[in-house]
Amino acid sequence: MTTSTRGAKTPAVLVLEDGRIFRGRAYGAVGATFGEAVFSTGMTGYQETLTDPSYHRQVVVMTAPHVGNTGVNDEDMESKRIWVSGYVVRDPARVPSSWRSRRSLDEELAAQGVVGISGIDTRALTRHLRERGAMRVGIFSGNALPDEGTMLAEVRQAPEMAGADLSAEVATTEPYVVPAIGEKKFTVAAVDLGIKGMTPHRMAERGIEVHVLPATATVEDVYAVNPDGVFFSNGPGDPSTADHPVSVMQGVLERGTPLFGICFGNQILGRALGFGTFKLKYGHRGINQPVQDRTTGKVEVTAHNHGFAVDAPLDKVSDTPYGRAEVSHVCLNDNVVEGLQLLDKPAFSVQYHPEAAAGPHDAAYLFDRFVSLMEGQRA
Ligand SMILES: NC(=O)CC[C@H](N)C(=O)O
């Protein structure tokens, strides 16, 4: 049995850029780390969260009070490593319990050098972020900590998320292929802006051979694989910096190849169509967000991880250089744009995560919609 009491006696401090301070205990690696403080309302799926490249440079606060209960297994990783820059939990599991567990979350964080903090009032911290908005944060742990003024100064020197161009830091540098499961029906070029492993898997399950291409891929690279469809992935950072993927997507829209985007990919489609993007006050993160598909009227419970959103009109069809476009999905909590579709070309995107490995799976139909677009193109 593995217990998770490694850092339990080592003091740790969380310092927000507005000067609010929380004191707790070290969790994971001991040291100092910085990032954007964001909260996730997922009750489960922490392994998928930690390894989602979209969380690069973010310190994730878990609103669920007990974290680590099922330990860490070798199957649920969304990528090869943990990407969050820091991790904040109320009450870590002392004894992980699952037939799949291989090690404790505390050990895994430490092994990967991820500094965390436990034993703080994550509810108060979440309410603070909700009122003041996502902001920079530092976690400092160890037996000899700097004074508060020094820590605060370091937090205020850390880079902000607004304006950050991060895809190249997380995406593959070499193309690779995820083979179709069963009979191959389609080829898709997937531009990796920080892709989660489950996304090509969900396509492969539908007979798609996925050619994952680096974020730097050009229109020529995309068409070199002779794709039936083109996909743009999720990813970290500020979509207003993603000029290169926007221009590649415009090349795809010009040719009219079926196109699907998830999360960062939705923001790229928004920009490719001429809409703006903006930073949300504290974003949507978790696996319990209600979204309405306005094309069917159905409401789905969905997985989210986004801090930015597309600024497109909800109540009218927009004329764009690629034909008419409309907002296909909307978040029922706050009316944020959660999906876009073109009416004259086979292209659509969603701001949330239909691949959601930890669930819910209400939105899995979107992969089938992508398949239908590719079938339609062949017919
Ligand atoms: N998961 C994502 O693709 C996130 C997109 C973007 N980085 C955001 O925060 O909104």
Image (cartoon, helix red, strand yellow):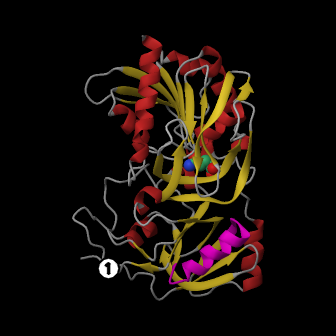
Quadrant for the N terminus in the image? bottom left
The crowd level at tag 1 (other Cα within 10 Å; few <14, some 14-19, many 20+) is some
Q: Is residue 277 left or right of residue 82?
A: right
Q: Is residue 128 magenta?
A: yes
Q: Is residue 233 magenta?
A: no
Quadrant for the C terminus in the image? top left
Location of residue 19 by image quarter: bottom right
Secondary structure, mark 1, is loop
Location of residue 141 by image quarter: bottom right
Total marks placed: 1
Asked whether 293 or 1 is in front, the reply is 293
Residue 94, position in %: x, y?
Answer: 35, 81
The reply to whether residue 217 is visible in this rendering is yes
Residue at left offset 43%, top offset 12%: 378
129, above or below 317, in the image: below
316, above or below 283, in the image: above
Residue at left offset 47%, top offset 44%: 298
Residue 90, position in %: x, y?
Answer: 49, 79
339, above or below 285, in the image: above
**Which residues fall within the magenta stretch?**
118-137
Asked whether 44 or 3 is in front, the reply is 44
Residue 353, position in %: x, y?
Answer: 49, 46
The reply to whether residue 82 is visible in this rendering is no
Residue at left offset 32%, top offset 34%: 205
Mark 1 — residue? 3
Q: Is residue 271 left or right of residue 1?
A: right
Name the amino acid, label 1. Thr
